[in-house]
């Protein structure tokens, strides 16, 4: 039975790895946490005169290089001057040459978000009147291509190596200390360390090209590597390598001095290894938490330690599961039922921690129930939740097999094996006495018989070990758990490269506002003006879009309506909205307007007087709580 199972195990693992590779391949360019939420000039707008600069606003801080922001004329020639710079907060700008002629200009951007993911894109605006352009506005390909695929594969292997390294070591130290002397267990943990080390080095080499040109030839560019080392992501990868050096020392002690100690002598060393191993494992987990999604956005100070606990829980559960699978299938030494029961208890605690931290992370990254179905991050998260539920269900079956597992068959097998060895030894002793008279020529025959006897003993031990039907059932259920875990890890890897639901919805709202504003600007002479502005007061629930309507947008009395919506399009009930109008060219204003609340998210003011035609600055102050407020503004041609 076991001889037919082993090929099936290898085939299953290869198929699962192929499926995960396909999933990573079709993931496409990495979606970034940062999203473009506004620009000046806006996308598609037609301005009367050439602006002095082009500014872009993102949902979070981004890292810039010398050519992160570029502005191209209709013929594709760059018209920006100098390096891009930070204007304020999350707004960045690049100066333009003076005297730009009329036509359509293309703005391209390629930056790195604060959570280490590249983001690129492009849009157009026109001066005077639109014209034909030779520049493609399909957007950038940051994080795509061969380099993007290799980077995604490196991330997957780094997670897999971390899980096997931490979980395998925890299984040996906390559940099956005899496993420290078992060769397959040693190879498993060392293999996890080698995988994580190799993947980290690969990511470090790919990082510069991944966030930049995307060219394979730039992978070994030392200048790019030097720039990477100065970034937060580069520092995290270097820190991971240093911690892996400490992990190598831990492994050498665990499978060296620790294995050679007697049971009583192991107690003090066990405590020391547990403390040291926990510190190293937490440090490795922090190298992800401090550089990716958890490090930016809402409640980053809480999210980072929560992410560390989440990663450790995943590693202890899935890595320990892998170690148990290897012990059940590859180890000649039988795994005691007590060790399996201890791991079952540890796995249960890990699942509890995993669920608790996962609920917090889901709330933080999504923010609304609608994001589960309306965003790619939410859809992937639903798949992950389903896989975790399936894994827990299979684990419940494994716990039932564990409860029924007995060591009686194994002990009986040991006794039978001991008797057979005694008989074989006596027989061998009689043969050796007869062989002594024949001389040294029969020594090779004796060695051959000894090897045959050892092989027979090993085969007999395996048959005895597999004789317990409960143990056989446990092996099958653990194998099924491991198969689901491989797919779960692939989905998790893609999830970490996907734009969180909150950010995706903010970006959609900003694009909708920009499109509406551009449309209103192009039809300003139709008798009405609509302005859409994204805002963020900085509070827990402070993001949204404010829309201001002027009708008929002329000199004299006008009707003004103000609408405030959340990023998901729902009406936003906030305490106060104020509007101020300024005609800077004539030094008129600000003219304060306090609209009346009509309904949830709707304010109105009648007979708003516009004394003169011109390019009026409309500033809206939005207050979402007693202390959280902000002012956003936009210009509109009135009259």
Image: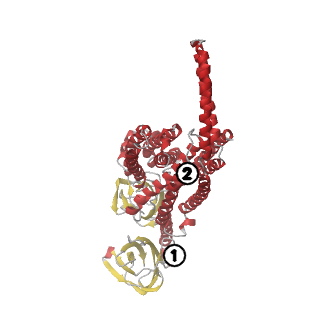
- Confirm whether residue 371 shows in the render: yes
Q: Residues within 10 Å of mark 2 (few under 14, many from 20)?
A: many
Q: Is residue 81 above or below residue 194?
A: below
Q: Nearer the viewer, residue 636 or 282?
A: 282
Number of numbered discs present? 2
Q: Tell me the residue that label 2 is attached to.
A: 490
- Nearest to the eye among marks 2 and 1: give it: 2
Q: Position of residue 79 (x, y in %)?
A: 40, 54
Q: Residue 198 carries which label?
A: none
- Find the distance from the CA under tag 2 to the CA under tag 1: 34 Å
Q: Is residue 295 above or below residue 622?
A: above
Q: Could you say whether the residue bearing mark 1 is in a helix, strand or loop?
A: loop
Return the residue nearer the eye: 519 or 535: 535
Residue situated furthest left in the rendering: 587
Q: How is the image coloured?
A: secondary structure
Q: In which quarter of the image is the N terminus?
A: top right
**x and y percentages locating residue 101 in the rendered image:** 42, 59
Marks 2/1 in contact by CB < 8 Å: the verdict is no
Q: Name the residue under label 1.
A: 570
Q: Residues within 10 Å of mark 1 (few under 14, many from 20)?
A: few
Q: Where is residue 450 in the image (x, y as percent from the top left)?
A: 59, 25
Residue situated in front as seen by the camera: 211 or 484: 484
On screen, residue 84 versus residue 411, left or right, reads: left
Sequence order check, earlier mark of 2 and 1 = 2
Question: SS of the residue at dot 2?
Answer: helix
- Up-down: is 427 above or below 53? above
Rendering coords of residue 304 (x, y %): 40, 59
Q: Please determine whether, in this image, residue 383 is positioned above or below residue 324.
A: below
- Answer yes or no: is residue 127 visible: no
């Amino acid at each position: 039975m076991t001889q037919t199972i082993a090929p099936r195990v290898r085939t299953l693992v290869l198929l699962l790895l192929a499926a995960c590779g396909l999933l990573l391949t079709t993931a496409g360019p990495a979606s970034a946490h940062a999203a473009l939420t506004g620009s000046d000039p806006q996308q598609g707008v037609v301005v009367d005169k050439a602006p002095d600069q082009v500014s872009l606003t993102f949902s979070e801080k981004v890292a810039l290089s010398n050519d992160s922001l570029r502005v191209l004329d209709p013929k594709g020639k760059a018209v920006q001057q100098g390096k891009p710079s930070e204007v304020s907060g999350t707004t960045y700008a690049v100066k333009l040459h003076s005297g730009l002629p009329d036509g359509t200009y293309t703005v391209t951007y390629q930056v790195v978000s604060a959570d280490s993911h590249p983001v690129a894109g492009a849009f157009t605006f026109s001066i005077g009147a639109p014209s034909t352009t030779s520049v493609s506005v399909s957007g950038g390909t940051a994080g795509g291509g061969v380099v993007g695929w290799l980077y995604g594969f490196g991330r997957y292997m780094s997670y897999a190596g971390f899980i096997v390294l931490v979980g395998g070591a925890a299984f040996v130290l906390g559940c099956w200390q005899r496993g420290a002397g078992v060769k397959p267990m040693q190879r498993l943990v060392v293999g996890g360390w080698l995988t994580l080390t190799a993947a980290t080095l690969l990511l470090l080499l790919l990082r510069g090209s991944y966030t930049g040109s995307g060219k394979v030839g730039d992978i070994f560019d030392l200048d790019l590597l030097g720039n990477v080392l100065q970034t937060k992501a580069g520092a995290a990868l270097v820190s991971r390598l240093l911690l892996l050096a400490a992990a190598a020392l831990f492994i050498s002690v665990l499978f060296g001095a620790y294995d050679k100690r007697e049971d009583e002598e192991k107690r003090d060393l066990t405590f020391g290894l547990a403390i040291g191993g926990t510190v190293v494992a937490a440090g490795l987990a922090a190298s992800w938490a401090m550089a990716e999604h958890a490090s930016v956005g809402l409640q980053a100070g809480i999210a980072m330690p929560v992410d560390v606990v989440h990663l450790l829980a995943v590693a202890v559960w899935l890595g320990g599961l892998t170690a148990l699978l290897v012990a059940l299938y590859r180890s000649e030494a039988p795994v005691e039922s007590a060790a399996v029961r201890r791991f079952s208890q540890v796995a249960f605690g890990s699942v509890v921690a995993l669920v608790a931290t996962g609920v917090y992370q889901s709330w933080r990254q999504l923010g609304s129930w609608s994001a589960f179905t309306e965003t790619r991050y939410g859809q992937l998260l639903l798949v992950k939740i389903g896989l975790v539920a399936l894994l827990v269900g299979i684990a419940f079956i494994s716990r039932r097999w564990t409860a029924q597992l007995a060591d009686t068959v194994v002990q009986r097998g040991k006794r039978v094996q001991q008797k057979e060895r005694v008989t074989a030894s006596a027989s061998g002793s009689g043969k050796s006495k007869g062989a002594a008279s024949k001389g040294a020529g029969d020594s090779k025959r004796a060695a051959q018989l000894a090897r045959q006897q050892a092989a027979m003993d090993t085969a007999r031990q395996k048959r005895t070990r597999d004789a317990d039907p409960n143990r056989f059932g446990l092996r099958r259920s653990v194998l099924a758990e491991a198969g689901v875990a491989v797919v779960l890890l692939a989905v998790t890897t893609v999830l970490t490269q996907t734009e969180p639901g909150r950010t995706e919805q903010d970006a959609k709202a900003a694009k909708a506002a920009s499109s509406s504003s551009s449309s209103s600007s192009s039809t300003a002479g139709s008798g009405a003006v609509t302005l859409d502005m994204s805002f963020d007061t900085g509070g827990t629930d402070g993001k949204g879009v404010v829309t201001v309507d002027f009708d008929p947008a002329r000199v004299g009395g006008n009707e003004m309506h103000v609408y405030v919506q959340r990023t998901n399009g729902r009406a936003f009930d906030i305490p106060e909205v104020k509007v101020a109008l300024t005609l800077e060219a004539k030094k008129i204003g600000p003219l304060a307007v306090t609209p009346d609340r009509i309904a949830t998210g709707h304010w109105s003011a009648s007979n708003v007087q516009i004394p003169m035609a011109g390019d009026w600055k409309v500033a809206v102050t939005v207050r979402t709580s007693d202390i959280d407020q902000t002012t956003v503004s936009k210009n509109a041609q009135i009259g």
